[in-house]
Amino acid sequence: MTSDKQAKIASWVSIAANIFLTIVKVGVGLWAGSKALFADGIHSAIDILASIAALSAVTIAYRPADDSHPYGHGKAEDLAASLVSLVLFMAGGYIVYSSTQGLFLPPHGLGQTALYIGIISLVIKEALYRYTKRLADSLNSPALMALAQDHRSDIWGSWAAVFGVGGSLLGRVTHVPLLTYADPIAGFCVGLLILCTSYTMGSSAIDALMERNVDPELLSSYIELAKSVSGIERVDRLRARKLGHYILVDVRASVQGEKSIQEGHDIIREVKFTIMNAHPDVKEVLVHLNPFYGEQ
């Protein structure tokens, strides 16, 4: 099965699961008056948007390069990740606000149904996270990784809902006033978690859109590989940037000035395929040769 088909299947699975979880958690959260479960349901609703964004992004990102987009369409994934992070930020802010209001209202009596829904959601979300994370790692897909991170934050949201509803139920039984407010406290924590997730996801996506250099460890690896090619006297400069699930590398290197154009061409090809064979996520290596005359 091709990479884009695997990514699309993962997105559709996430959409179907989150539609189910959103309907159940929001419905039961409103019926039971659970701030934590309702907040978790809103998070699942955001996950639907994240899944749709990921599906749209991978559909575009895996298109081959064309005359209008000679470097490919990989940035569609980074754009999708940035949009998802923005929606997450707005949702997180709303949940924090709503849950804070709940702290100043009389505690609402919750039923065991809300607790069971929270546990079911926790199990489903854990399975979705592991599946999507494994696929995102294998495909090196920012859009799927953003989706996996969203699932992970929803796992903690489900844990918060379970503890919040469970704490409120326990507070009613033990008559401990503080525990009866466990539900809005948990909802507040879910909101903060969503805000943190949006920041992490958004920062990574913006770095890619702004063409930030890749990690220094990767740059060092590319430089050493270029230096290992016979005929390369010195690597003068090397830059690399991510475009979604792949990387473009730009190399300036020095070779003996007496070499022929054919020899220079062969060296360029060797540098290119040495780096690409060692790093499958590198889809293009642009090499510029400078003349080298003795010690410079």
Image (cartoon, grey):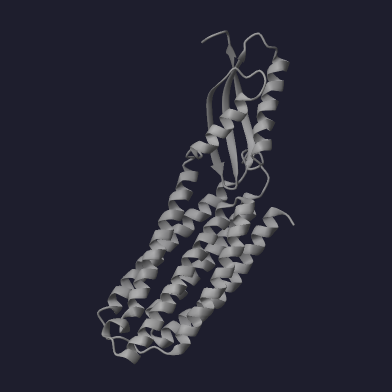
Q: Residue 236's x, y, as percent?
A: 53, 21
Q: Residue 68's x, y, as percent?
A: 62, 40
Is residue 61 at least partly visible in the picture? yes
Name of the residue lying farthest toward the left? 104
- At horizontal 35% and vertical 66% (from top left) the residue drawn is 93
On screen, 202 above or below 97?
above
- At horizontal 44% and vertical 62% (from top left) the residue drawn is 87
- At horizontal 63% and vertical 68% (from top left) the residue drawn is 13
Name of the residue lying farthest toward the right? 1
On screen, 229 above or below 14?
above
Name of the residue lying farthest toward the front? 174
Q: Residue 283's x, y, as percent?
A: 65, 39
State left or right for residue 105 relative to residue 207.
left
Is residue 287 at least partly visible in the picture? no
State left or right for residue 33 relative to residue 270.
left
Given residues 53 and 38, the one toward you in this image is: 38
- At horizontal 48% and vertical 68% (from top left) the residue drawn is 154
